[in-house]
Image (tube, rainbow, N blue to C red):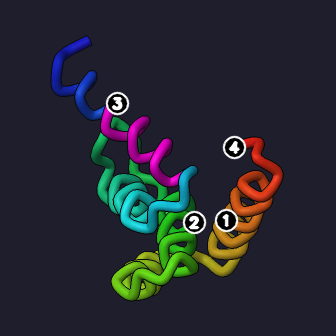
């Protein structure tokens, strides 16, 4: 595995750990990663929407704009799946199981 891949995976893992602590910037960064396919993850608009939604809930205004932009490229069913995933993640945080 190349150093750039290891670095990208480390970045994604550290952002996930920060997100689990409620860091809105980490949530936003994860959304960007899934939107653009960076930090060792594949492009996944459902995941991007989920993370932007969580960042918006955390109070980041730029996440609201990013979420809207991503939603423009998604079907209603995909948006519904992303919203359900965000609710599930929030639930797991409240349960302390994420």
* Closer to the eye: label 4 or 2: 4
Residue 17 appears in the picture as rendered: yes
Distance, label 2 to label 1, CA atoms, is 5 Å
Give me the disc on residue 98. 4
Determine whether 38 is above or below 73 in the image.
above
Mark sitting earlier along the chain (4/2): 2
Relative to residue 73, is residue 78 drawn left or right? right
Distance, label 4 to label 1, CA atoms, is 12 Å
Q: Position of residue 17 (x, y in %)?
A: 49, 42
Relative to residue 48, is residue 46 drawn left or right? right
Distance, label 3 to label 1, CA atoms, is 22 Å
Magenta segment: does it hold 2?
no
Marks 4 and 3: CB-CB under 8 Å? no
Q: Residues within 10 Å of mark 1 (few under 14, many from 20)?
A: many
Which residue is disc 2 drawn over?
Answer: 50
Marks 2 and 1: CB-CB under 8 Å? yes
Q: Position of residue 72 (x, y in %)?
A: 45, 84
Which residue is disc 3 drawn over?
Answer: 9
Distance, label 3 to label 2, CA atoms, is 19 Å
Marks 3 and 2: CB-CB under 8 Å? no
Camera-side residue of 60 and 31: 60
Magenta segment: does it hold 14?
yes
């Amino acid at each position: 595995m190349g150093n750039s891949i290891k670095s990208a995976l480390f970045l994604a893992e550290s952002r996930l750990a920060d997100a689990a602590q409620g860091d809105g910037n980490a949530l936003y960064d994860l959304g960007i990663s899934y939107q653009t396919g960076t930090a060792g993850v594949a492009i996944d608009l459902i995941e991007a929407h989920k993370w932007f939604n969580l960042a918006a809930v955390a109070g980041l205004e730029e996440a609201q704009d990013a979420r809207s932009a991503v939603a423009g490229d998604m079907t209603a069913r995909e948006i519904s799946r992303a919203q359900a995933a965000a609710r599930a993640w929030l639930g797991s945080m409240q349960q302390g199981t994420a």
